[in-house]
Image (cartoon, helix red, strand yellow):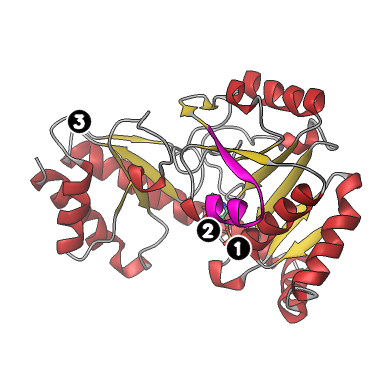
Amino acid sequence: MVICSGFTQALAIVCQVLAEQGATTMAVETYGHQHHRAVIAGNGLKVTPVPVDRHGAIVAHLDGADSALLTPAHQFPVGVPLSAERRTAAVRWAANSGATIIEDDYDGEFRYDSHAVGALQALAPDQVVYAGTASKSLAPGLRLAWLVLPAHLVDRVAAAKRLADFQTGVLDQLTLAEFIQSGQYDRHIRKSRLAYRHRRDRLVDAIQRRVPGVAVTGIAAGLHAVLELRPDQEENRVVGLASSRGLALEGLSAYRAEPDTHPPALVVGYGTPPAHAYTTALARLCAVLDDST
Ligand SMILES: Cc1ncc(COP(=O)(O)O)c(C=O)c1O
């Protein structure tokens, strides 16, 4: 395992190594962080689009690329898991073409309704780089992430990491190791999972009761929900109205790299408000949605 300073550095280093080995393109889901696309391009790979539908990334679009970045357990931000058929197809594509897939498992600790979704890496350990991060489970400011790598990439990635910054802060790593070994990390995850699930259920309940017609989707895992707007609600208008009332919301289009394939929606991070402000934030969100037609 190679420890990095957040997934951002992990992604940069893997792209750099793949580019050194001759890769030229990375297929990336058309909904995702613009920041990740910039990191990939900044490390020498051309980004090619993989559209997303309700079964996750449409993996037929991987053809032609020599690497891919996917969020198979919980597509970010649309929120759907990659279907079983597409998981198999993605791994087959990688094995047949010699491509490398980066599996970004950014919120795997927080799964609520369905059974655990296995790692893609388990299906193809020689083709898939698994990436985990403490940004959702502990804090984004910690900058701790981990890579489980195909054997043939370990030495090169470790060498690139050493060149980048020698190593990620050792005190933080030792503190996390102690937290895990003592059983406290596990307790923290179980407690947070309950708390976030409760927040999610309150969000779903409030929207269903107060703003009928707005659908809440993508909620089987993670810390965000997608609120699909009614046809009479404009994404930008809702985001603007929310901002004028002190509520920071994001539209789904902020994460889009290609023309629209999804209806207008909001990406709502229900883990963000402090506990004492959650009731007010929910009420404000419902009022904004109510007033934005
Ligand atoms: C899709 C996705 N991947 C990865 C990460 C983690 O990035 P980092 O470890 O650089 O904070 C996040 C945010 O927490 C995310 O939303």
Give the residue type at disc 3.
Gly
The magenta stretch is 36-49
Left or right: 35 in relation to 246: right
Mark 3 Cα within 10 Å, few/some/many (few <14, many 20+)? few
Q: Amino acid at mark 2?
A: Ser
Residue beneath label 3, please? 213
Q: Quadrant of residue 275?
A: bottom left
Residue carrying label 1? 188
* 1 and 2 marks in contact (CB < 8 Å): yes
Measured as percent of width and height from the top left, residue 237 is found at: 16, 48
For this orientation, the residue located farthest to the top is 85
Q: Residue at x 91, y 46 (%)?
A: 151
Q: Which residue corresponds to mark 2?
A: 192
Which is more toward the observer, 114 or 80?
80
SS class of the residue under badge 1?
helix
The reply, left or right, for residue 237 in relation to residue 5 is left
Give coordinates of residue 56: x percent, y percent.
Answer: 53, 29
Magenta span includes 48:
yes
Q: What residue type is disc 1 on? A: His
Determine the secondary structure under disc 3: loop
Residue 148 placement (x, y as % from top left)? 80, 50
> Is 293 displayed left or right of 61 in the figure?
left
Residue 85 marker: none
Count the marks. 3
